[in-house]
Image (tube, helix red, strand yellow):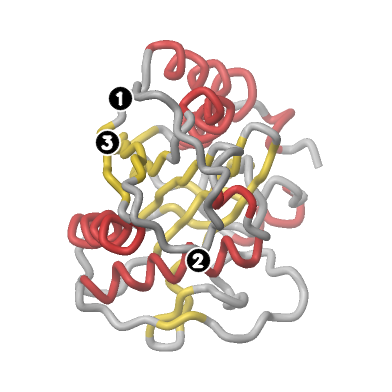
């Protein structure tokens, strides 16, 4: 791994002529509980990695996830998909049956970590919107915040959610700890959209707009082992998923 960079002089929304290295992980289709566990393991490791991580992944079976602070009893009737797993981030119920999922992790020293949650959300979906535009799909950001907290992520659009033809197609949930910022995103792809083209466009936009250099990332044995432990001892347990 390269020496960890210093970000202290940069505003999070400022342009820069400095090339910045981000780590890119294509982890393929994962078992549902392992997907949540790997994201938490990446968050725990963020200070050591010292660089942002973008992970693209899928699901070995259909599943659904729900927000960290939601009550299982209040959301279990909202989707027939099982397993139903508590995420390490907030938000509402998200169906994972053909969606495109991705994760971003930022270390505490990175400017994105310092953004307020709403500005982080806006910046994220402006990026997703730009990627769709590059792939030939027209979308827009929702302008007004909805009243109340939705229990199902895709039932209605919150401010800065991504819309296509009036319907919400992209949402995300965040969690900030002293170790870093975790963002878990889901895209319900429009008809005719191609995932590989969109992923490439997302990376290309970051390169051209923010001078990001992408470095392939292969997690070491310790990180995989930590994810397996979290999956076994946390995300597969009813005591975690039913605890509220």
> Residue 139's quadrant in the figure?
bottom left
Q: Is residue 135 above or below residue 23?
A: below
For label 3, count other residues whose C-alpha is less than 10 Å away and answer few (under 14), some (14-19) or many (20+).
few
Q: Nearer the viewer, mark 1 or mark 3?
A: 3
User: Residue 21, how many percent across, how many down?
Assistant: 34, 40
List the residue tagged with mark 3. Answer: 215
Nearer the observer, 36 or 177: 177
Where, quadrant-wise, is the C terminus in this rendering? top right
- Marks 2 and 3, Cα distance to the nearest angstrom? 22 Å
- Which residue is drawn at the image coordinates 30% and 67% (left, top)? 131
Residue sitting farthest toward the right: 244
| x, y percent for residue 205 | 28, 62
For mark 1, what is the residue?
218
Q: Specify the quadrant of the image occupied by residue 152.
A: bottom right
- Which residue is located at x 39 percent, y 54 percent? 97
**Real-space Cα distance between discs 1 and 2?**
27 Å
- What numbered label is drawn on residue 123? 2
| Viewer-proximal residue among 167 and 124 | 124
């Amino acid at each position: 791994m390269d020496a960890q960079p210093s970000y202290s002089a940069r505003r999070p929304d400022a342009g820069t002529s400095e090339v910045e290295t981000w780590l890119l992980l294509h982890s393929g289709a994962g078992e549902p509980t392992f997907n949540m566990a790997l994201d938490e393991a990446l968050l725990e490791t963020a200070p050591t990695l010292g660089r942002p991580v973008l992970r693209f992944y899928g699901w070995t079976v259909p599943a659904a996830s729900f927000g960290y602070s939601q009550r299982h009893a209040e959301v279990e009737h909202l989707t027939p998909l099982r397993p139903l797993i508590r995420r390490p981030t907030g938000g509402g119920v998200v169906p994972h049956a053909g969606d495109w999922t991705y994760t971003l992790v930022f270390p505490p020293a990175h400017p994105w970590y310092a953004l307020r949650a709403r500005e982080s959300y806006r910046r994220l979906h402006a990026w997703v919107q730009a990627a769709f535009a590059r792939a030939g799909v027209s979308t827009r950001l929702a302008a007004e915040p909805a009243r109340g907290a939705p229990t199902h992520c895709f039932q209605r659009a919150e401010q800065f959610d991504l819309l296509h033809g009036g319907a919400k197609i992209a949402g995300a949930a965040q969690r900030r700890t002293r170790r870093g910022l975790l963002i878990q995103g889901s895209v319900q792809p429009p008809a005719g959209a191609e995932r590989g083209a969109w992923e490439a466009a997302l990376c290309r936009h970051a390169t051209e707009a923010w001078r990001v250099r992408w470095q392939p990332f292969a997690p070491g044995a310790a990180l995989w082992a930590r994810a397996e432990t979290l999956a076994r001892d946390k995300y597969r347990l009813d005591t975690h998923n039913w605890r509220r």
